[in-house]
Image (cartoon, rainbow, N blue to C red):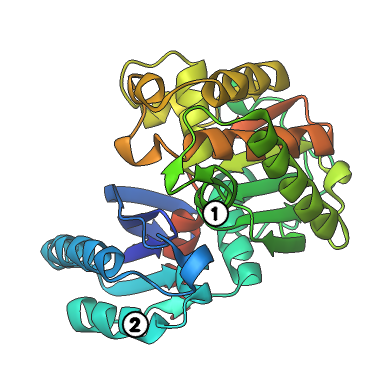
């Protein structure tokens, strides 16, 4: 076993996983998993820079995470930064702050690297780390929730600033990242006169759909989306929609992990969110306060993907890029 710490710093949230990893058996045992909404990408699409208040929120979370990592004695720490810091002109301010707090330099990874990590995290327990896979191979084990899952998998990670698409059957066959995420779509299309529309207008919803459709056209230049046998959805927009569909009174990762949402369920929930006011969305029991303003756009991105791919359902995974980062940290010295 090797004790590792993985940090995923995205556009909307920063997350920590400290785990014991055993590459020989494929076991990843969580010791501490936590998340904070810091909105690092606040205004980046408009200004091209990380806002000072967004940086301070992120550094405050890093200080908390540094204490957890030290307390648990992680041997290896890997910090991965995604879309927002990739786009920002002042990303060096971010890098210097992280190094000063955690003693490791954040890896501002490319979209393709982000996609590979997401795929590893989402499918490791389904395929095995060394598995070559086979097209349309039924997945064994895992109980009823995993029964009948077939490869190839299409892993879709809907983040704040970007969405990653990865097609694979035990290993990555094709991947692409596009700048379509819940925060970016909200700031680009749902803000009117400095405030988020409450609820969005038909024209604003249409603008998001047009933007996402164009992004999916770019994805399909590289990733054959319609070849997927199983759609696997990752990250907060997807897990929140799942929690709503399950009628949860409080967030329950075990109930959400490997739950399946039908196209009809996603369409109904998306419509409900798009027609709701801020107060109505905030009143949903499982809604994280940091997702109230961006969940409608995130759900619409998911619905658009399902409609484009022809997927009748999406398998929801709580294991995502964070787990993939942990696995790569465990294998760094292998």
Give coordinates of residue 52: x percent, y percent.
27, 71
Q: Check the image and report above or below for 81 versus 149.
A: below
Residue 52 visible within the image:
yes
Q: Tell me the quarter of the image containing the N terminus.
A: bottom left
Say whether residue 211 is left or right of residue 317: right
Give coordinates of residue 84: x percent, y percent.
47, 67
Which residue corresponds to the image point at 30% horizontal and 21% vertical from the top-left?
250
Camera-nearest residue between 161 and 47: 47
* Res 95 label: 2
Task: Quickly name the residue at label 1.
Answer: 184
Say whether residue 233 is left or right of residue 37: right
User: How many discs appear?
Assistant: 2
Question: SS of the residue at dot 2?
Answer: helix
* Res 42 label: none
Which residue corresponds to the image point at 43% horizontal and 62% vertical from the top-left?
43
Q: Check the image and report above or below for 188 versus 328.
A: above
**Crowd band around label 1 with a 10 angstrom C-alpha radius: few (<14), some (14–19), many (20+):** many
Camera-nearest residue between 25 and 298: 298
Which residue is situated farthest in the front direction here? 193
| Pointer 1 or 2: first along the chain | 2
Residue 23 visible within the image:
no
**Crowd band around label 2 with a 10 angstrom C-alpha radius: few (<14), some (14–19), many (20+):** some
On the image, which quarter does residue 66 sit in? bottom left
Question: SS of the residue at dot 1?
Answer: helix
């Amino acid at each position: 076993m090797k004790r590792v710490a993985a940090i995923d710093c995205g556009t909307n949230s920063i997350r920590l996983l400290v785990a014991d990893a055993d590459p020989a058996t494929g076991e990843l045992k969580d010791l501490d998993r936590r998340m904070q909404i810091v909105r690092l990408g606040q205004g980046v699409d408009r200004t091209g820079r990380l806002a000072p208040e967004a940086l301070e929120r992120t550094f405050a979370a890093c200080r908390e995470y540094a204490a957890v990592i030290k307390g648990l004695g992680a041997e290896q720490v890997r910090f991965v930064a995604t879309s927002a810091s990739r786009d920002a002109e002042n990303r060096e301010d971010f890098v210097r702050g992280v190094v000063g707090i955690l003693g490791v330099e954040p890896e501002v990874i490319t979209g393709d690297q982000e996609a590979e990590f997401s795929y590893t995290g989402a499918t490791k327990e389904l395929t095995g780390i060394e598995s070559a896979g086979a097209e349309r191979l039924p997945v064994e084990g895992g109980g009823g929730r995993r029964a009948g899952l077939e490869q190839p998998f299409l892993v879709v990670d809907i983040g704040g600033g970007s969405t990653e698409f990865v097609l694979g059957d035990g290993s990555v066959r094709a991947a692409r990242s596009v700048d379509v995420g819940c925060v970016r779509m909200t700031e680009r299309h749902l803000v009117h006169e400095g405030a988020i529309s409450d609820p969005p207008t038909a024209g604003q919803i249409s603008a998001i759909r047009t933007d996402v459709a164009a992004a999916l056209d770019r994805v399909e230049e590289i990733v054959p989306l319609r070849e997927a046998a199983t759609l696997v959805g990752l990250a907060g927009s997807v897990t929140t929609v799942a929690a709503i569909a399950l009628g949860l009174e409080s967030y329950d990762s075990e109930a959400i992990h490997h739950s399946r949402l039908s196209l009809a369920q996603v369409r109904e929930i998306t419509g409900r969110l798009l027609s709701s006011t801020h107060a109505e969305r905030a009143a949903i029991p499982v809604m994280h306060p940091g997702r109230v303003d961006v969940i409608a756009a995130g759900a619409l991105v998911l619905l658009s993907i399902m409609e484009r791919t022809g997927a009748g359902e999406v398998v929801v995974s709580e294991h995502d890029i964070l787990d993939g980062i942990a696995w790569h940290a465990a294998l760094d010295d292998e």
